[in-house]
Amino acid sequence: MFIDDAENKQDFYYKLNHFLEPEPPVRTLNNDIYALESEIKRQLNDMEKSLQLLYGHTFENKPVFELFLDTLRIKILNYI
């Protein structure tokens, strides 16, 4: 705490009061922990669903991820 005028007791007591009882911090953008936690849970749920779609389903008795890998191999071979 800096006091520039020893005669100014009002300023001293004002600064001392704010030093002992500070004002709570002001929320800034994206500082709401509950909203951030909800967003993280939503994204994790979406990722779980996408993994379930990719690895948990089959199409014509072949896992979907194998079809995806086959498609990638075909695209790579077409570019070579």
Image (cartoon, grey):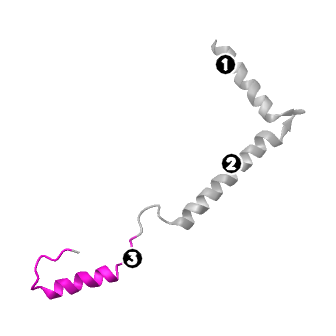
Q: Which mark is residue 76?
A: 1
Picture residue at 90% right of the left edge, 33% below the top: 61
In the picture, the quarter occupied by the N terminus is: bottom left
**Three-letter amino acid code at the position of disc 3:** Pro
User: Label 3, label 2: how many angstroms apart (C-alpha)?
Assistant: 37 Å
Give the secondary structure at mark 1. Answer: helix
State yes or no: residue 5 in magenta.
yes
User: Image check: 47 left or right of 63?
Assistant: left
Tell which residue pokes out farthest to the right in this image.
61
Picture residue at 78% right of the left edge, 45% below the top: 52
Magenta residues (range): 2-26
Residue marked by disc 2: 47
**Three-letter amino acid code at the position of disc 1:** Ile
Q: Nearer the viewer, residue 75 or 20?
A: 20
**Three-letter amino acid code at the position of disc 2:** Met
Picture coordinates of residue 2, whole percent (x, y): 19, 74
Residue marked by disc 3: 24
Q: Nearer the viewer, residue 32 or 11?
A: 11
Q: Pointer 1 and pointer 2: residues touching (CB < 8 Å)?
A: no
The numbered mark, 3 or 2, whose residue comes first in the sequence reads 3
